[in-house]
Image (spheres, coloured by chain):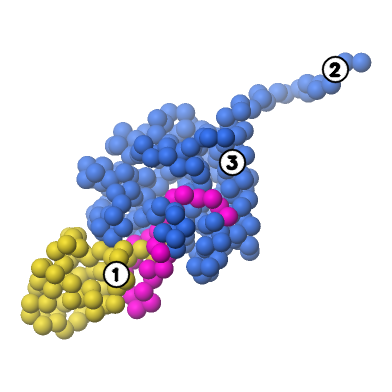
Amino acid sequence: MDDPLTIAGREFGSRLIMGTGGASNLAVLERALIASGTELTTVAIRRVDASGGGGVLDLLRRLGIEPLPNTAGCRTAAEAVLTARLAREALGTNWIKLEVVADERTLLPDPVELLDAARQLVDDGFVVLPYTNDDPVLALRLEEAGCAAVMPLGSPIGTGLGIRNPHNIELIVARSSVPVVLDAGVGTASDAALAMELGCSAVLLATAVTRAEDPERMAAAMRAAVDAGRLARTAGRIPKRFWAQASSPGI
Amino acid sequence: MIVRVNGEAQEWAEGTTVDEIVRRLGAPPSGVAVAMDGEVVPRATWEATAVRDGAVVEVLTAVQGG
């Protein structure tokens, strides 16, 4: 079934966006990425060191996966804007996953710095995909600022706690005219399926796959879950009823 | 002169360019970006951009993350 994800006018056949963090090595990551079917995958921007570290870009290029640089680790709008500009220079893409976190323990987005950075980067010609709180008001503000998608968390990064406030995700979806990508907190396949059933356009995840006992198998599970959730959403689920309703004809 | 490269104070000759610093770091041939004193230095200008005493140079690339 042809049902592409469209962000900023660009189509992707897969609605699963992957991250590369947490994989024990590149060979494991490669098998997981292939199994996931992803076409868009995040990378972080860090100092060049003696170990080289450039291997992940070569891997993505070989697999035909578009790299999506992020601003992970940035705490202020100024840091995030500079990191985005360096990513554009290094990778030749004006797409950026904007991440501005408030502290190391929660890794929750700092809404004030995030919105400031989003406005600056949109003005500078970036396609901005912000990692945001599950706050329907902030999501709207980010959309108004010109972001190409909004990416609310299900729960904090790396916790695997799933979607803690499904109603907020539904509220964000109901009012958004840009794609909503559930980003962070996915622990297992049912979380990814739920995100899609709630109306998200895509799911972005890393830890749930890269730190699973069998990353390749979990990547396949996530792919199936995203597809199943999307199908269920577009199929139109039955309303919930209080009393039973017989599914066989009366005797 | 002293230049801070990726957090490390290093001794460099006057007139050193951004390109020379990147090359000595052994950075991969592509996928690299440079900031000097908080501003991006476009790759096309690395060879022509002299580094001044006390400059803070960051040489960055893409790694696993996110």
Res. B26 visible in picture? yes
SS class, disc 3? helix
Foreground of the two, A216 or A156: A216
**Disc 3: which chain?**
A
Between the residue at mark 2 and the residue at mark 1, the CA separation in whole angstroms equals 71 Å
Residue under label 2, please give it: A249
Question: Looking at the picture, which amino acid does disc 2 mark?
Answer: Pro
Residue under label 1, please give it: B29
Label drawn at residue A197: none
Question: Looking at the picture, which amino acid does disc 3 mark?
Answer: Asp
For the residue carrying disc 3, how many other residues have a C-alpha within 10 Å: few (<14), some (14-19), or many (20+)? some
**Disc 2: which chain?**
A
Chain with colour blue in the figure: A
Q: Are marks 1 and 3 in contact (CB under 8 Å)?
A: no
Q: Is residue A57 part of the magenta span, yes or no?
A: yes
For the residue carrying disc 1, how many other residues have a C-alpha within 10 Å: few (<14), some (14-19), or many (20+)? few
User: Residue shown at 28%/60% (left/top)?
Assistant: A90
Snapshot quadrant of residue A106: bottom left
SS class, disc 1? loop
The magenta region covers A35-58
